[in-house]
Amino acid sequence: MNISDKLRLLFHNTESICVLTGAGISAESGVETFRGSNGLWSKLKPEELADFNAFMRNPELVWEWYNYRKKIIHNVKPNPAHFALAHLQELVKDFTLITQNIDNLHIRAGSKNVLELHGNIERSYCIDCGKFVADVEVSLENKVPHCQFCNGIIRPDIVWFGEMLPEGVFEAATEAANQCELFLTIGTSAVVYPAASLPLIARENGAYVVEINMERTEISHSVNETLLGKAGEILPQLVKMKEEIKG
Ligand code: BJW
Ligand code: ZN
């Protein structure tokens, strides 16, 4: 990793950091990413699984898929990148963590007030009355859960394509991107909007934008610097640097 003097100095001085994460941050935990040669979307069709109409056509199939992923997520652990961000929050006065991930790993690592743009696999809600349900039981007998209040179909609290992001969450994320001095975009291909607009909003408002990724992405040409490598290796080093400064 080649950290520029500019980033070193900024990291040294700043008390205002905003972070956006994507699937790549959980890759080292063993959670598959979406795009790329081994990503989920290389084997499965998003329009059959991550779409409300697809869910209504075949809720059993979609529940089966989320149940399968939930099991994987329950069997993995947060990695050094998740822990480094949870620690960084303790070292900086104004810190906002925005994630596109639904895997709950930031929260399990100890991060607080996480802005979850695309929902969380641990939550579900009724499509009719909107009531949230924890611990949905999906089994061979109960393939599609129904609401105990109105008998409506329960769906995972995941934002599918063409759906609006949860109310207020993107607004809070935009405000943080607008106000921060340093913006980190980590492990995201930056192709899904409106999430991918956040680093651009930060840059337009004067933040220094740093990308951490295994490869260059759609927004590499718009950021101030790209640190190429694994988030689980780069982030602990960056946070250690800040910790040493703090004494
Ligand atoms: C590492 C690493 C390591 C690996 N270290 N790095 C035309 C029609 C309709 C809509 C649209 C349209 N055109 C545009 C839109 C909007 C649409 C969109 O952006 N589409 C584009 C894809 C074309 N967006 C939406 O629909 C959003 N809603 C919206 O805009 O509402 C307004 C609206 C309403 C109605 C009509 C139009 C607009 C909602 C988006 C919801 C996205 N949902 C998903 C699926 C969740 C379901 C699930 O999980 O099952 O969220 S899609 C999927 O992509 C998931 C992710 O959060 C999201 C982003 O992916 P991410 O995180 O970037 O992962 P990858 O896999 O792409 O990248 C991983 C990266 O990590 C890579 O770069 C690796 O190199 C890197 N990496 N290992 C560091 N160790
Ligand atoms: Zn209901």
Image: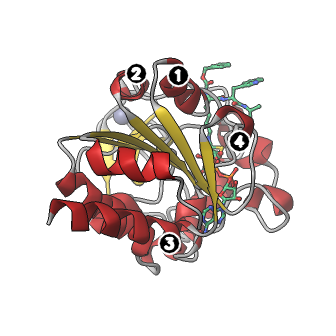
Residue receiving disc 3? 232
- Give the alpha-carbon distance from disc 3 to disc 1, as whole Å: 26 Å
Disc 2 secondary structure class? helix
- Where is the N terminus found, in terms of image quarters? bottom right
Q: What residue sits 22% from the left and 61% below the top?
A: 245
- Mark 3 crowd level (few <14, some 14–19, many ≥20, 10 Å Cα): many
Asked if the residue at tag 1 contacts the one at tag 2, i.e. Cβ–Cβ closer than 8 Å, the answer is: yes
Residue name at image x 37 percent, y 44 percent: 10
Q: Pointer 4 and pointer 2: residues touching (CB < 8 Å)?
A: no
**Mark 2 and mark 3: Cα distance apart in space:** 27 Å
Q: Left or right: 158 with respect to 17?
A: right
Task: Say which amino acid is labelled 1.
Answer: Ile
Mark number for residue 201? 1
Q: Is mark 1 within 8 Å of ligand 1?
A: no
Residue 106: x percent and y percent? 36, 59
How far is disc 4 from disc 1 in space, using C-alphas?
14 Å
Between discs 4 and 2, the one toward the N terminus: 2
Of tags 4 and 3, the one toward the viewer is: 4
Quadrant of residue 161 within the rendered picture: top right
Read off the residue under disc 2: 178
> Mark 2 vs mark 1: which is more N-terminal?
2
Judge from the rendering whether residue 218 lies leftward or rightward of residue 193; answer left or right: right
